[in-house]
Image: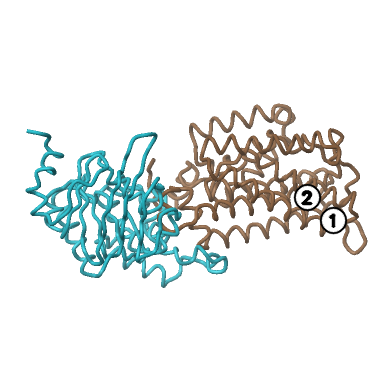
Amino acid sequence: MTLLEIEHLTKEFDGVTALQDVTLEVRAGEILGVIGPNGAGKTTLFNCITGMQWPERGAIRFRGEPIQGRRPHEIARRGIARTFQIVRPFPNLSLTDNVLVAHGHQHYSHLRSSTAAYHTRTNLELVHGLLERVGMTTGHDRQAGTLPLGLKKRLEIARALALNPSLLLLDEPSGGLRHEESQQLLELIRRLSQEGITVVLIEHNMPIVMGVCQRLVVLDHGIQIAEGDPAAIQRNPEVIEAYLGKR
Amino acid sequence: MLSGYLVTVLITIGIYVILALSLNLITGYAGQISLGHAAFMGIGAYTSALLYTKAGFSFWPAFLVAGLVAGLVGAVLAIPCLRVREDFLAITTMGINFVVEATFLYVPFFGAGMGIGGINPPSLFGKEISKPGFLLLVGGVIVVVIFLDRWLIRSWIGLAWAALREDEGAAGAMGIDVVRFKVLAFTLGSAIAGLAGSLYAHFLTFIMPVNFNFGQSIVILSMVVFGGIGTLRGPIVGAIVLGALPEISRPAMEYRTLLYGLLLLLLMRYQPDGILGERSLLARGWNALRGRVTPMNN
């Protein structure tokens, strides 16, 4: 079953084409890797899916319904959650409150429920559970800005999970992490996938990509140059050329 | 008994406390800088004054309508503010202040440069309330605003504002309707400023455009920043200290704008969280005394 369909997506910035006629689909339950050299348009793709940037042309359908032109909060509430390449936790809020912000997505649209107190026992238990699920068992009252990078990335995943997403977009989750941290992350992504969350992963770390992704899409200069299973992609001459240049 | 002079000073300070608390909703909690808050105080004051002097309203309904009108105008004027952030927002709100002041100044309906006089203090059971009675009224409004403030900040609305203040883009990606919560902050903050403006008009009994100019906005912002932006105690203490200062010292009155400007500069450089903010020297010292550690960052 197709969860997300992208058709002929084009996004331009002041005449520079960041994405050109990209067509791809994300199947329910899979872990799809999006790879490509720097500036290939990977993050722009995420920004278009999540409504943070609006494409010039093309269609994006989630569960069969068009979502292009919708604003970020509407898309988030439909069940598409993301993390950021350059981490963006709310730095002066505690870990608990960071996750609570996302957990509140079901309350923000109704005046009555948005005036309810949020530090309730049920909410706190749920949030602590999410933090533990990403491996953060202590220090939930710390300010997020004081965390080391690896933990900030985990926090972003916990925050995304609080949206109760069916599609999780991870933008270079292993960037800047040490080897063992990357390994733990790999485990976490596998576990989330087993729990039924569909994952799209932008990643530069090839061992992670090859280890966890079932299918890969390769972008170069905004154009999709290849698509297929990891082994085939590794042998694809066009992909090798995009990464290493022409021989 | 309190002397008449002291009561007058306390009422003025009390009105500033309401104004500082209302600006704190917009700038402190929701993180939307406003350099034009006096405009909404003015809209409340003029609404109340016009309803009272021209439409035959008594104080109480005029007071409520003043809050309503200021809130509605705040909601409408929030729209041009939605597309701009930080320094551009500061300039936009400053512009709003100039436009509103100019409207009072040049439109004859608003009394133009002569302002509006003959606004009487409120009456209760057919009798005009005394000055101490007016002070009680102001105190009552402060208490209600504090309760509202606490309630909002413990609710999902308060959390959404905090997220907005921290990172607008990330807040949107977490399901927060950025537009809705910005407009809500501007509406509520402006409405409360309108109530304060109405109290101000019926206390002074005479209002002029200059009472609601850019300088007045800076005075209110200084109070919020001085005490500690984004806290409840900060704007209250800021309004009390900076409101009392011109009464205690005559030079402070004459050089008020200079003094407050200088104060803002020094605070931004040495105590950006104000004297009572979470990371201020005083708050850290207090927490250290109580054996609590406040993390240092930024």
Labels 1 and 2: the sequence-earlier one: 1
**Vertical arrangement, residue B68 with respect to residue A238, above or below:** below
Q: Amino acid at mark 2?
A: Ser
Name the residue: 91% across, 45% down. B118
Q: Label 1 neighbourhood size at 10 Å, few (<14), some (14-19), many (20+)?
A: many
Res. A198 image quadrant: bottom left
Which chain is painted in cyan?
A
Q: Colour of chain B?
A: brown
Q: CA distance from mark 1 to mark 2?
A: 9 Å
Q: Is residue A127 left or right of residue B76?
A: left
- Label 1: state its secondary structure: helix
Q: Tell me residue A37's x, y (percent).
A: 20, 40
Q: Tell me residue B15's x, y (percent).
A: 72, 48
Quadrant where the C terminus of chain B lies?
top left
Numbered badge on residue B59: 1
Residue occupied by mark 2:
B198
